[in-house]
């Protein structure tokens, strides 16, 4: 893969727009997910995203390839890793087509697939001092379920592997 989509620094929506823009594409849909100040009635101080990066990069590339084929769009996405504060951009998705409907549809589909399939874990830091892990494709998990215990095979990936929907190369993940 020539382009990194998981970044440890700030995201740039203009970079994503530039990656999909062409004179024949009159519609560019953009989604920017930012860290909000609350979740579940609690005040969020910060988030920390961590990932099994080689697999996450591959999975995100596969999602983007599928979106290109499914919606006939140019599409790009980036997700930030590391510690983010309220208001920081966590994810950017841009899709372009000659008409708005496919661009919007692709943008929504990509973010939904990304959140459900890409092995990125979110650790929420709350002002009350109690952290909480949230895994891709699942509801909230408690602190004990962080990537330290899930690194060998996240539940969402394990479920997909058992169902046969994860490529064979991704079924065995090293714990290193």
Image (cartoon, rainbow, N blue to C red):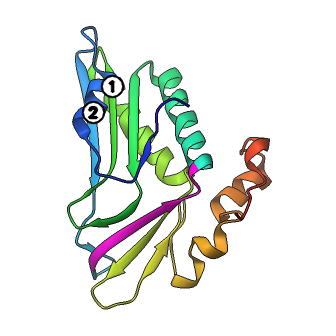
Q: Which residue in the protein does label 2 denote?
A: 15
Q: Is disc 2 placed on a helix, strand or loop?
A: helix
Q: Main secondary structure of the magenta part?
A: strand
Q: Residue furthest top?
A: 24
Q: Is residue 104 left or right of residue 116?
A: left
Spatial CA distance of label 1 from label 2 is 6 Å
Give the image location of residue 144, x and y in percent. Answer: 58, 84
Q: Height in image: 109 above or below 89?
A: above
Q: Is disc 1 placed on a helix, strand or loop?
A: helix
Neighbour tally class for label 2: few under 14, some 14-19, many 20 plus, Cα within 10 Å: some
Residue at horizontal 27 percent and vertical 33 percent from the top: 15
Image quadrant in which the N terminus is located = top right
Q: Quadrant of residue 138?
A: bottom right
Q: Quadrant of residue 148?
A: bottom right
Give the image location of residue 120, x and y in percent. Answer: 51, 58
How many labels sit on residues?
2
Residue at horizontal 26 percent and vertical 36 percent from the top: 30
Q: Which residues are magenta?
A: 44-53
Residue at horizontal 72 percent and vertical 59 percent from the top: 158
User: Is there a contact, CB below 8 Å, between mark 1 and mark 2?
Assistant: yes
Give the image location of residue 111, x and y in percent. Answer: 41, 45
Give the image location of residue 137, x and y in percent. Answer: 54, 59
In the image, 10 versus 87, the foreground residue is 10
In the image, 3 versus 121, the foreground residue is 3
Q: Is residue 93 left or right of residue 154?
A: left
Q: Which mark is residue 19?
A: 1
Q: Is residue 45 magenta?
A: yes
Image quadrant in which the C terminus is located = bottom right
């Amino acid at each position: 893969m020539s382009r990194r989509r998981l970044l440890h620094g700030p995201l740039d929506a203009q970079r994503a727009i530039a990656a999909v823009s062409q004179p024949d594409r009159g519609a560019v849909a953009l989604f920017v997910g930012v860290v909000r100040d609350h979740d579940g009635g609690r005040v969020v101080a910060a988030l920390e995203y961590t990932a099994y990066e080689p697999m996450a990069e591959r999975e995100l590339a596969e999602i983007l390839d599928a979106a290109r084929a499914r919606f006939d769009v140019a599409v790009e996405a980036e997700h930030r890793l590391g510690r983010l504060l309220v208001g920081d951009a966590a994810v950017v998705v841009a899709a372009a087509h000659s008409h708005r409907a496919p661009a919007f549809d692709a943008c929504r589909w990509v973010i939904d697939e990304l959140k459900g399939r890409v092995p990125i874990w979110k650790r929420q830091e709350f002002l009350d001092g109690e952290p909480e892990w949230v895994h891709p494709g699942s509801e909230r998990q408690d602190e004990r379920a962080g990537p330290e215990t899930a690194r060998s095979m996240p539940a969402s990936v394990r479920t997909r592997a058992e169902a046969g929907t994860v490529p064979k190369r991704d079924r065995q993940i090293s714990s290193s």
